Image (cartoon, rainbow, N blue to C red):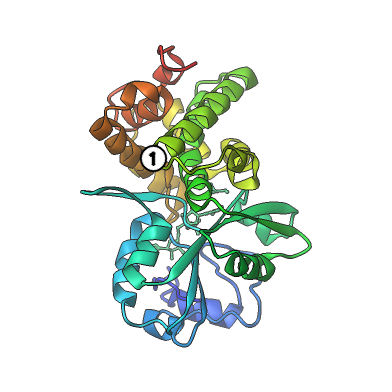
């Protein structure tokens, strides 16, 4: 396991601490890792000889990591991305699995689902969806690798749909957190989730007409939306943002509340907004647009429940 090296307050390196205690005391305290997990701060040595590579970092860092890996992978290596997010380039939006595949010349599936990490770590039952393009055999191999009695994995031949579900639900979770911070009830939150899911589907289909409706009923779709709107970090920080009347920035609250962990929803809202403005789709997506405008302080948190004509 490659680990982004950090010096802990004790002065010890994070990788050394993980290897001594068999536990990540900063990001997953209290959970023993498998004895075969060795933390390695050297990217090149971590991927050496690997034939199956799992990418799971905040999406902000993946491009830099991939650039360092060019030419270092074993020929024929397969990749899978658990990363929820997208990049917006001059040419338009680029999903993270495509960025990995194009930069490294590998086949890259995705795994998304209602998977809050701390709950999986204590082995509570959950489900996930693997998205793949064409190669079902590879998708089944990944599913076999990830499946345990408490983690059920299905496959869907809709890589863009699966990845966009995981990516876009983080924006809706920000909206749900704002609603919580405004002390609104369950009806309001359910309305936000419904409108959000509808916009997620419409946006995904506009970007990739091949995206399937069924994907939104898999774990990566409605289930991940529900769990993140109820218990995720995007929701929690957005609640604090609204309670502060939007006076403290998301960056500030993220640093204070998450201590090194990263929010995906705020940057994803900005990236999606760029696509919406560039393509002239803003009016079609009032919820996705409003979340970004609230995040940057252009609108107050209360705007999340102001009726706009597109929000049917
Ligand atoms: P995180 O948000 O907790 O961020 C902390 C991680 O980022 C640490 O592992 C840290 O070492 C690493 N990091 C910090 N600075 C870095 C840098 N400059 N370069 C590379 N790495 C750096 O991370 P996470 O929760 O593991 O999320 C990673 C991805 O997994 C995200 O796309 C997220 O959406 C997705 N995901 C997370 C969860 C969850 O519940 N945590 C669930 C499903 C999917
Ligand atoms: P948060 O980043 O909001 O905690 O969401 C985690 C997640 O993606 C659950 O599937």
Q: Which residue is mark 1?
A: 207
Quarter where residue 146 is shown: bottom right
Q: Position of residue 242 (x, y in %)?
A: 44, 27
* Residue 245 in sight: no
Residue found at the very far right of the displayed protein: 149
Residue found at the very far left of the displayed protein: 90
Residue 308 to residue 139: above or below: above
Residue 195 to residue 230: above or below: above
Residue at (74% x, 55% y) in the render: 124
Q: Residues within 10 Å of mark 1 (few under 14, many from 20)?
A: some
Q: Position of residue 218 (x, y in %)?
A: 64, 44
* Residue 38 in sight: yes
Residue at (53% x, 48% y) in the render: 162
Horizontal side of 117 relative to 124 (left or right) equals left
Q: Nearer the viewer, residue 163 or 188?
A: 163
Residue at (38% x, 65% y) in the render: 100
Horizontal side of 4 relative to 273 (left or right) equals right
Q: Nearer the viewer, residue 68 or 209?
A: 209
Q: Nearer the viewer, residue 43 or 259?
A: 43
| Label 1 residue SS | helix
Q: Position of residue 88 (x, y in %)?
A: 29, 48
């Amino acid at each position: 396991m490659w680990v982004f090296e950090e010096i802990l307050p004790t002065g010890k390196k994070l990788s050394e601490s993980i290897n001594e205690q068999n536990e990540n005391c900063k990001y997953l305290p209290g959970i023993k890792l498998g004895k075969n997990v060795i933390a390695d701060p050297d990217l090149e040595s971590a991927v050496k000889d690997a034939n199956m590579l799992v990418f799971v970092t905040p999406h902000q860092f993946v491009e830099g990591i991939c650039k360092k890996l060019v030419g270092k992978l074993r020929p024929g290596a397969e990749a899978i991305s658990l990363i929820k997010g997208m990049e917006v380039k001059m040419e338009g939006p680029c999903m993270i699995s495509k960025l990995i595949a194009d930069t490294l010349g590998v086949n890259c599936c995705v795994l998304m689902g209602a998977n809050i990490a701390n709950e999986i770590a204590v082995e509570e039952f959950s489900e996930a969806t693997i998205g793949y393009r064409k190669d079902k055999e590879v998708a089944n191999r990944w599913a076999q690798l990830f499946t345990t009695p408490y983690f059920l994995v299905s496959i869907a031949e809709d890589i863009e749909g699966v990845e966009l579900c995981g990516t876009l639900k983080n924006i809706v979770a920000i909206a749900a957190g704002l609603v919580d911070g405004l002390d609104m009830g369950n009806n309001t939150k359910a309305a936000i989730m419904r409108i959000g899911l509808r916009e997620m589907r419409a946006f995904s289909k506009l970007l990739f007409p091949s995206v399937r409706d069924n994907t939104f009923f898999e774990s990566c779709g409605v289930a991940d939306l529900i769990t993140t709107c109820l218990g995720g970090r995007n929701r929690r920080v957005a609640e604090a943002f609204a309670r502060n009347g939007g006076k403290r920035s998301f960056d500030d609250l993220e640093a204070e509340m998450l201590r090194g962990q990263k929010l995906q929803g705020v940057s994803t809202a900005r990236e999606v907004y760029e696509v919406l403005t560039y393509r002239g789709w803003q009016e079609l997506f009032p919820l996705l647009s409003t979340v970004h405008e609230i995040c940057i302080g252009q609108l107050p948190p209360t705007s999340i429940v102001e009726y706009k004509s597109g929000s049917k």
